[in-house]
Amino acid sequence: MLDQFPMQQIINEKGNVNPEVQTDLSIEQIKRFYYLMLRARMLDKKSVNLQRQGRIGTYVQYEGQEAAQVGSAAALEEGDWMFPTYRDHAATLTFGHSMRNLLLNWRGRLEGGLPPEGVNIFPPAIPIASQLPHAAGAAWAEKKRGTDRVSLVYFGDGATSEGDFHEGLNFASVFQVPAVFFNQNNGYAISVPMKKQMHAKTIAQKGLGYDMECARVDGNDVAAVYTAVKEAVQRARSGGGPTLLEAVTWRYGAHTTADDPTKYRDQSESDKRRETTDPLLRLERYLKQEEAWTDAWASSLEKEINDEIEKAIEEMENYPEADISQLFDHVYDVPTWTVQEQIEEHLAVKGGKA
């Protein structure tokens, strides 16, 4: 199966372009990718610090997966649909999500899951793989409406062991919906390595059972990811049906800030990858070879992004505190007696009566 699904790559670890691959990506597009990936990484690092300082709750980091997320999201068009997991901030930021709202999400605010008006980003899925059937359904709805809108849905390697993964792919295949199933394979489903999750050598091959297009791509090569997803999106948009893509990548840090990855994997692997397969370093090497990199340009990006992050943090921390009574909203149209009893108890305590 590894021979049947070779790793697609355009820019290798040394920043060299594969001469056998045709690409029309310009230097300006590559620089734009670098900016978006740097923006995502800086926000991720800052968010980990915010959690350590007690300014946000448990946080889910993604450092190392920026190319997979940015490259895929950049292939969408306005009006398309995105179905992220709780880890896909680089993707949602690229597609137009509010940085402030992303931070509010980790502060426990309902508004954190709301994208700007007109941006079709589904609230981040916490249950593993539950977003795949939703993505297939949204794509089917767009097809029935006669639009050319596409769904792009994210999930990890562990999600492919869930029933929702198979249900989503089967539904998409049967109805030939315009959906792209984008797997980020970082080798671990929390503490379980891929070899203990499945006998299959690749995740891409799982699409064969549903007779859909499927491929593997270097998830640390933003150019390769963008090209592969763009092709899949265009195929879906033109009526060619769904695609399953496996982006092979690596996350440097823990599953969440509440996790200790040293318990189940050798973290020295992350140190090695920072010097070899890192997605941002790869673009830096490429741009330097093309004489399109200056330290002044890179520094200006960092300052611009830092200012944006600090402004978003200020907005987050100045946002009104949540009212615990919101926990009872949207549970039932008419509260049951058990919920009503809890509401009354809460109001009594809040009013100092109990």
Image (spheres, grey):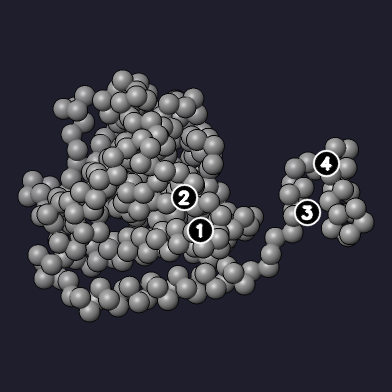
> What residue occupies the far left of the structure in this picture?
19
Q: Secondary structure at mark 3?
A: helix
- Residue toward you, 202 or 172: 202
Q: Is residue 230 above or below residue 248?
A: below
Residue sitting at 50 percent across and 29 percent down? 164
Residue sitting at 17 percent across and 71 percent down? 293
Q: Which residue is mark 3?
A: 325
Q: CA distance from mark 1 to mark 4?
A: 32 Å
Q: Which label's residue is closer to the chain start, 4 or 2?
A: 2
Q: Which residue is mark 1?
A: 51
Q: Which residue is mark 2?
A: 257
Q: Are marks 1 and 4 in contact (CB under 8 Å)?
A: no
The amino acid at mark 4 is Val
Q: CA distance from mark 1 to mark 3?
A: 24 Å
Between tags 1 and 3, which lies in front? 1
Q: Which label's residue is closer to the chain start, 1 or 3?
A: 1
Q: Which label's residue is closer to the chain start, 1 or 2?
A: 1
Mark 1 residue crowding within 10 angstroms, few (<14) / some (14–19) / many (20+)? some
The amino acid at mark 1 is Gln
Residue sitting at 32 percent across and 60 percent down? 37
Dot label at residue 339: 4
